[in-house]
Amino acid sequence: MNINDRLDFSHEPVITVDDIISRVQAYHTDVDVELLKSAFEFANYAHRNQKRSSGEPYIIHPLNVCATLIKLKMDVETIAAGFLHDVVEDCDISPHEIESKFGTSVATIVVGLTKISKIEFRSTEESQAENFRKMVVAMAKDLRVIIVKLADRMHNMRTLQYVSTSKQQKVAQETLDIYVPLASRLGIHSVKSELEDLCLRYLHPDVYYRMAENVAMKRSERDHYISDTIQVIREKLEEYTVKADVTGRPKNFYSIYRKMHNRGVEFDEVQDLLAFRILVSNITECYKTLGVIHSYFTPIPGRFKDYVAIPKQNNYQSLHTTVIGPKAERIEIQIRTHEMHEVAEKGIAAHWKYKERGSGIVDPQAFTWVKDLLEFNQSVKNSSEFMDAVKDDLDMGGVFVFTPNGDVKELRQGATPLDFAYAVHTEVGHRCVGAKVNGKIVSLKFRMKSGDTIDILTSKNQAPSKDWLKIVKTGRAKTKIRQYLAKIERDRSRDMGEQQLDRALNGYGTNSKALDKRGEFKKALEAFNAKHLEELFVHIGSNRCHAKDVLPYIPSLKIVAEAKEKAPDYSATIEKAAKKSATKDNAVIVDGLDDVVVRMGKCCSPIPGDDILGFITKGRGITIHSVSCSRMQEIEQGRRIDVTWNSFYAFKHPVSIRVVTNDRPGILALVSKHINNAGINIRSAMAKSLPDQRGGLLFEIEVKDYSELLKVVSSIKSIEDVLVVERANQLSTVALT
Ligand code: MN
């Protein structure tokens, strides 16, 4: 183990194409050497006049990129693309030329990389979402694009000391925002942790160099400690005949930094700086090893994680535990099989099949995530919605904040005090009016940072509103707010429904409570599919049914209605209605009254020739229904009034007819023609296929009266393939559409 590995991010300045070829051959015996050589020669020539910021010949960059790809054991096409990755972008070589010389796969990867290099990355949260989206689209063609991009970024980060300070900042921030989460999500841990440390070096140089110094100062002491501990672990495992590879190392700087930052502690206070790794041959041995470790070293409660039984989303598998080590220092121990280790270090790259050329196909399982993401990309409306959904996926790390009592809560990035309030307790969330962050009052929209201490302010009078859904970031808070709003809506509907029903019952001198006590709602509940009276209120209040619809199902009311038959005196109502915007051009004549407002019932749309009745509506005049209309039965006797058709009425009446035909082309046009030929206006027409090769047509036409309707109906009936013609009322219209 060499602690210095961590400090030495220098690239390989003297690497040659022969080094590359022999390293590839070490894991890939029958490698296509010609392809690698010609790709190198091509790139070497194309970049011949270019230099890196370091002053070195440009070709040293593609060579180093290939070195990283080799560590990930990538296939030969990917390595060829590594040589060529900058020639389209920097040397004006056409993709076509790459394709004809090196094949479609290599060209696809190079073109994908060129596209990514043109993405204008911006650092605000909103555009970060767009950045991710673009990256995902670039990955779409070939996932190897992103692996080469990561290797490219790794070398650029390794040589970042040669560019200006402002560029260092920009590139490092972009790396931390975009490439680290991607490497993490693709499970390429080796790349992820090196990129993180490099980012730390440029974004927080003070922290970084302090750590580096600290680690270096204690180096020999630490080296001893590590080798002693390894020895102890080995001996214990040997006692139990477990064959294992044991290694130890300081944790990567960025993970220590994150811990310091999250817990608000100093470097010296971070305890588990060392991590040990035990590789064994199978899963049973993993758990056996864990048992041995826990029996010799005291485990820290709550620090054991079983990613073997429950792998992470990026397929990472390992057992994690933190124990008190031999010198009473906390140490982290990871236990996994060799295969799991391969996946842990190389992630998606470990799934590559590189046995033959052209088979750069990744394990479909490992690919699922990217595929899902791409499909998702197509289904969401905008990039922030996309981001919202993949945020958890991308393992962007949460914020750790404290309650006033010192309890830690982990929430996702961008979380607000409202999210925190809901994380504490649902009621605290509902009543939250604001918060004190580190003693200062902030708004609900404040975005918390790790280490903040949050004191939630509540008020009895506070309640969640729809706007809150836009403020909160966590799924938990969103769900709780939605549930609350749904309940409020339900309560409101229930109250309104109760009022409406009681108003309807008022005319019968009773109310819902009294009727409920006598069990009078039994039939109504059944009819309207309600479990209890409250649910029936909700139905009424949310307009799923009307209070009046319920009345016929209340047994005792019928008796009351009949008893009231002779009682009505609605003349006052009628007179009032008459004064309201009366028209002389009424289609019907109401017994003895001229200027009364009448409307045709939409449910039955009566036309002259139909037997009709008027129904007195308070304040709205009179509604005309056909005697056969099912609504008529609900109308209490007392409100009915005799009416007759006005033969002087000059306007036509709308009526709907339904035509069932054998389904054949042109039938709609043919029926329409018959209607038009009868001199009848069509207001609307609709056609629909019905089962058994039949077609349904629905016309709304305008007729003078019933006899005109009959004429047109018989004309339609004469058409071949017409099976049924019927007058449609509102109910069958619904059934048809
Ligand atoms: Mn490059």
Image: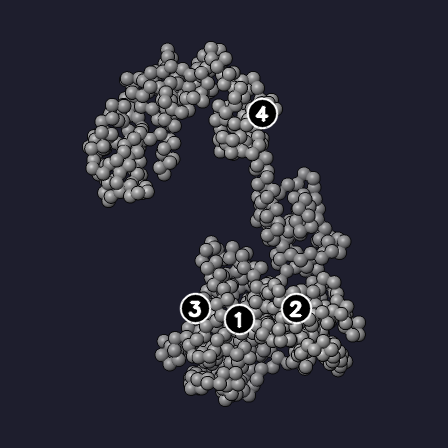
Q: Dot 2 surroundings within 10 Å: few (below 14), some, or many (20 or more)?
A: many
Residue 649 is situated, as x and y percent measured from the top left of the image, at: 29, 20
Q: CA distance from mark 4 to mark 1?
A: 66 Å
Determine the residue positioned at 47% across, 55% down.
Answer: 380
Residue 38: quadrant of the picture: bottom left
Residue 143 is situated, as x and y percent measured from the top left of the image, at: 47, 70
- Residue type at mark 3 is Lys
The one of 451 and 688 positioned closer to us in this rendering: 688
Residue 434 shows in this picture: no
- Residue type at mark 4 is Gly
Where is 4 relative to 435, above or below? below
Q: From the image, tell me which residue sits under label 3.
A: 141
Which image quarter is the C terminus in? top left
Q: Tag 2 or tag 1, which sits nearer the N-term?
A: 2
Q: Tag 4 or tag 2, which sits nearer the N-term?
A: 2
Which image quarter is the N terminus in? bottom right
- Residue type at mark 1 is Ile
Q: Tag 1 or tag 4, which sits nearer the N-term?
A: 1
Q: Which mark is residue 711?
A: none
Determine the residue positioned at 21% across, 31% down.
Answer: 715
Q: CA distance from mark 2 to mark 3?
A: 35 Å
- Residue type at mark 2 is Leu
Q: Secondary structure at mark 2?
A: strand
Q: From the image, tell me which residue sits under label 1.
A: 348
